[in-house]
Image (cartoon, rainbow, N blue to C red):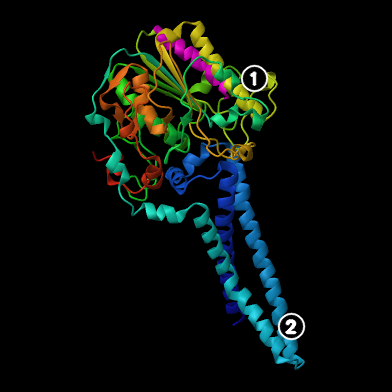
Amino acid sequence: MHHNNIYRHLIRGIIRFTTYLLAFFIFILAIWVTNNFGQPSLEQLLYHAQFGYTGLLDTDSAIIKSFVSWCIALPMATAVFLVGIEYSILFYFVQRSSDIKAHHLKSENIKYLKVIYWFIDHRAPLYLIFLACGYFCFHFSVINFVHSQFGRDYFAEHYLNPRVVQVKPIQPKNLVLIYVESLEDSYKQPSLFGKNLLASLDKVSGSSFTSYKPAPGSWWTIAGITATQCGLPLKSISLYDGNDQGQVIKQFLPNAVCLGDILHQAGYRNVYMGGDALNFSGKGLFFKNHHYDEVLGREELKGQLINPEFNYWGLYDDDLLRLAKAKLMALRASNQPYNLTITTIDTHGPDGHLSKYCKSKGSDSFESIVACTSDQVSEFVGFMQDKGFLKDTNVVIIGDHLAMENPVYAKLNRIKQRLIYNKFISGSPISKNRDEIIPFDLFPTILDFIGFEVEGGKLGLGVTAFSSDRLSSKLLNYEDMQANLLNKSDKYLELWSISK
């Protein structure tokens, strides 16, 4: 009988420990995600979950260490502590109950002790896990996500498949497309930062849209790339098994027509260069599946550097842009039209990455990293200008998305309408048809910008902003799109189906 009691208490302790562990993991995970990434959507969390632990291993090692410390070690330690405290209290109350019975004390005291014993013995872990789940659901708008599974198919109503649109080169130019990590117009405001942190980029001759607003399913790097190159949002598909891939993506939008596909058909050589690992978030797979001839990430580029210095993600921007200059020279020597796509990393949250180059220029804070990145990108454009490349090459500089959690996030959130940075640089005059764009518009707009004619001016969910026609009647209703674009869509899933 004694052994049975020990076994029963052991099982009970393990169950309570597991329940406490799960409750604190859920609660702390929500806080940790917000502290490191701002306020990501549930779609974003589910999307990254599709890549499993291999995707996590290719992220910033500092973030991995932080995740282990906060989301694994802390909940475990807290669960052990609580179970230990509980057993100590229960042992005390059992002993007191025995003493009361032995000394014939008031029965009301016994009842009181039994109530406390019953609460600790049964209810505490359940209450805690219900509270944790409730907090997580509220924090990540799970109700909105569930609602999206039953809303109207907004995507099918508005998506125009590029396969049915005639796109032809008229006076095609080369393209250099630079995605600057988390770069937004907010950094221009002296009222927040004491000066315009993007002053060097502002001095570069070019044209910008005054309002480049974010759109659903474009809130993180690979989503921003997908939105601007394919004219569609990025969202989790594993729940629907639309790719027959279980939890690992094997092909990236294999049935979608994107920027790289159209340029490839027109004879362009497409090259991607980024300082981080290609495996993270499926970025490398996206470019490889959409006719990029060279896809170069951390592992592919580090061998080209002498005594390379790395941040937690990979190459610093100064090394990346130096290699990009060499790649640009090689592309021009080939006499083939080209598209060179670059993604930077130094301004990535939560803390940014301070390179030796930026330190040598006096950088010592996150704000100065932003300014240093601005200087480096503008210097890269200056290099192209000095070499005479801008005669036949157009440059697009855009933030991949709005900034997430970083040291100046509280300042950024003072702005009522935060906007993504954008600049279009061309040796020819630029004529805009409006001043408000969203990421999906970049797909047809970039093609129009480099000399392609897009029939009707629309591709995917985007409408060109450079056509001579105003096209305002074809623009999506922004509020309606915000509310319904991420609803479940069979048409969207068809773009992922590997059976086609």
The residue labelled by disc 1 is 357
Q: Is residue 244 visible?
A: no
The foreground one among 366 and 475 is 475
Q: Residues within 10 Å of mark 2 (few under 14, many from 20)?
A: some
> From mark 1 to mark 2, how far is it between C-alphas?
69 Å
Magenta stretch: helix, strand or loop mostly: helix
**From which residue to which does the magenta span run?**
316-333
Report helix, strand or loop for mark 1: helix
Residue closest to the eye, 431 or 163: 431
Q: Amino acid at mark 2?
A: Arg
Q: Which quarter of the rendering shows the C terminus? A: top left
Residue at 59 percent across and 18 percent down: it is 200
Which image quadrant is residue 431 in?
Answer: top left
* 471 left or right, relative to 221: left
Instruction: Please give left or right for residue 57 compared with residue 232 in the image.
Output: right
Chain-order first, disc 1 or disc 2? 2
- Residue 21, percent from left and from top: 58, 60
Q: Which residue has dot 2 on it?
A: 96
Instruction: Decide: is 124 above or below 320.
Output: below
Residue 47's place in the image compared with 160, above or below, is below
Q: Name the amino acid, label 1.
A: Tyr
**Of residues 417 and 369, the one drawn nearer to the viewer in this rendering:** 417
Q: Secondary structure at mark 2?
A: helix
Q: Point out residue 301 in the picture as x, y percentages from the top left corner.
A: 50, 22
